[in-house]
Image (spheres, rainbow, N blue to C red):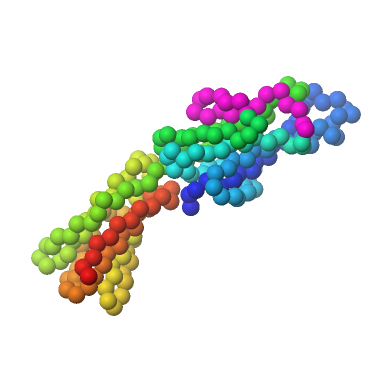
Amino acid sequence: MPFLPLFFLLLVACSNNLLHSETKSLSIERVSIEVQNKSYTVLTDYSIPYSDTILESDTVFFYAKVNPLGAKIKGCYWSIESKDYPCQQSRNRYTFDSTGLYPVKLKVLDIFGDTLYANIFMRVSSKPICSGIKLSFFQGSPIFKWNCKNTDDEAELTYRFILKTKDKADTLFLKEDSLQLGYPLPSDYWKVQLNVENSYGFKDSTEMSLL
């Protein structure tokens, strides 16, 4: 479910300029990336650039940490949306203002002139918005139609339609924005709850009822 976790990626720093006597101690130096928002999850698959999803206008904190402590580097830059930002001592704040898939790269230059890279991808999405449900009838059969706006063109919407009566609750999963029941509604009590979710996990809901 979307909401951005804490990612941890490791790159081994190797240099062709190492002296023989330095190889053992310096070849174990690593550059690590921490990307923090609200929750804390450790990524263990280092071989594939990771992608996670946040909401449009969410603020993300990028933090570059060099291991081991005290290792010297000549330069450190974040590359986001084709712009370079120097790595700060504290976390770098960044806000994505529109939906899309954004590559985020960390570039570190070590003291031997080698350049190390680490990459992640940020999928920025937005919540669907439902404005209500309308009820009409065709030959006595109720037809429910809802208006849910998909605010992310790259996402697909899935609907969960729940019809509750005194005796039971029926749940249907739909791709369409309407449903025609094959039986009449009870005259004393019924309630419809509609939950919509886009393909990146962001949700909205609406309901209508006869109490």
Q: Position of residue 130 (x, y in %)?
A: 29, 51
Q: Is residue 87 above or below residue 185?
A: above
Q: Residue furthest front?
A: 90
Query: As drawn, is 133 to the left or to the right of 6?
Result: left
Q: Residue furthest right?
A: 21
Residue 145 image-quadrant placement: bottom left
Residue 79 image-quadrant placement: top right
Residue 119 image-quadrant placement: top right
Q: Is residue 193 above or below residue 99?
A: below
The magenta segment is 70-87
At a point 17% along the width and 64% down the height, the residue shown is: 142
Residue 78 visible from this viewpoint: yes
Query: As drawn, is 83 to the left or to the right of 148?
Result: right
As rendered, which of 93 and 42 lies closer to the eye? 93
As rendered, which of 75 and 100 lies closer to the eye? 75
Residue 155 on the magenta segment:
no
At a point 21% along the width and 60% down the height, the residue shown is: 144
At a point 77% along the width and 36% down the height, the residue shown is: 69
Q: Position of residue 186 (x, y in %)?
A: 19, 73
As rendered, which of 77 and 113 lies closer to the eye? 77
Query: As drawn, is 146 to the left or to the right of 29?
Result: left
Decide whether the magenta segment is chiefly helix, strand or loop. strand
Q: Residue furthest left?
A: 139
Q: Position of residue 106 (x, y in %)?
A: 61, 31
Q: Position of residue 4 (x, y in %)?
A: 52, 46
